[in-house]
Image: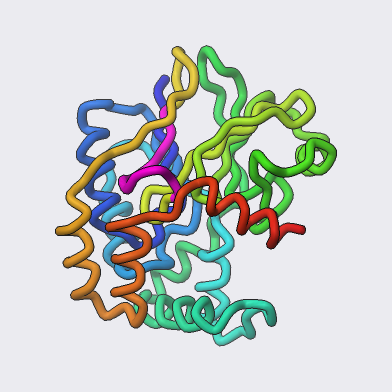
Amino acid sequence: MKVAALYDIHGNLPALHAVLDELEDVKPDLLVIGGDIVSGPMPAQTIERLFRLETKVRFIRGNCDREVVMAFDGEPLRPGMSAKGREKTEWVAKQLTRAQRDFLSQLPQLFVQYIEGIGEVLFCHATPHSDEVIFTPLTQQERLDAIFQGVEQGTVVCGHTHIQFELLAGKTRVINAGSVGMPYADQPGAYWLLLGPNGCEFRRTAYDVEAAANEIRRSDDPQAHEFAEENVVQVPTAAQAMEVFERMSG
């Protein structure tokens, strides 16, 4: 069995198209969509593309998906959210239909799948107990062990921080799939994870980022230009992102 884990698409439809095109050759048996699906420049189009998948697919919820539903419902967002984050979340919520909102609202936080050669794998967005807790390879081992304490599966696949990495927390192998739509990496592209009998393989799909940026700039997203320039044409490095995340988590 081959499983493709696609995390943190963030409404980047061109990046999603590129990965799905590559998957036509890979032919996975299952796709796991790991949350933070719509919070980006093409939210409604992205979720509709995923609805048309012919491959078997399982979805889990990300923190941004949860917050978009809250905004759709008119519930107050978390006090610590930045002004830009609030603007994006409220704009995305206005782009969705009631049916799309209802789909996001019922997504589970966890999914478990047995994969030959790996064993039982727990898929979550950030951690098994939270959709927003931050950790990186720079996180102190004691804190990592505490975050994953009590996990029964030998492998956990997560996302949330948009950085591909692998580490050990206690006896748990933790693998971050990276981000399809907003990666933090050494070069632009769409990052994802392939799991199967041969183990876990970090994947990067190259795509025409200039054409994608132009498409994104033409969207109605109030932050479209910034997204195109800072998350598509050029991307923050993993090292830069980890430093920021460690300050946030500290």
Residue 57, x across and y down, in percent? 40, 41
Residue under the point 76% across and 23% down: 171
| Residue 74 higher or lower than 185, as above or below | below
110 in magenta: no
Q: Is residue 112 visible?
A: no
Foreground pick, 241 / 133: 241
Q: How does the figure colour the protein chain or chains?
A: rainbow
> Residue 245's quadrant in the figure?
bottom right
Residue 14, x across and y down, in percent? 23, 55
Give the quarter of the figure containing the C terminus: bottom right
> Residue 150's quadrant in the figure?
top right
Residue 164, x across and y down, in percent? 50, 39
Residue under the point 60% across and 18% down: 119
Report the side of 34 relative to 50 (left or right): right
Residue 163, x across and y down, in percent? 51, 45
186 in magenta: yes
Report the side of 143 relative to 213 (left or right): right
Report the side of 150 relative to 64 (left or right): right
Residue under the point 53% across and 52% down: 240
| Residue 151 higher or lower than 81, as above or below | above
What span is colored magenta in the figure? 184-194
| Residue 28 higher or lower than 147, as above or below | above
Report the side of 44 relative to 65 (left or right): left
Give the quarter of the figure containing the N terminus: top left
Residue under the point 73% across and 49% down: 129
Q: Is residue 179 visible?
A: yes
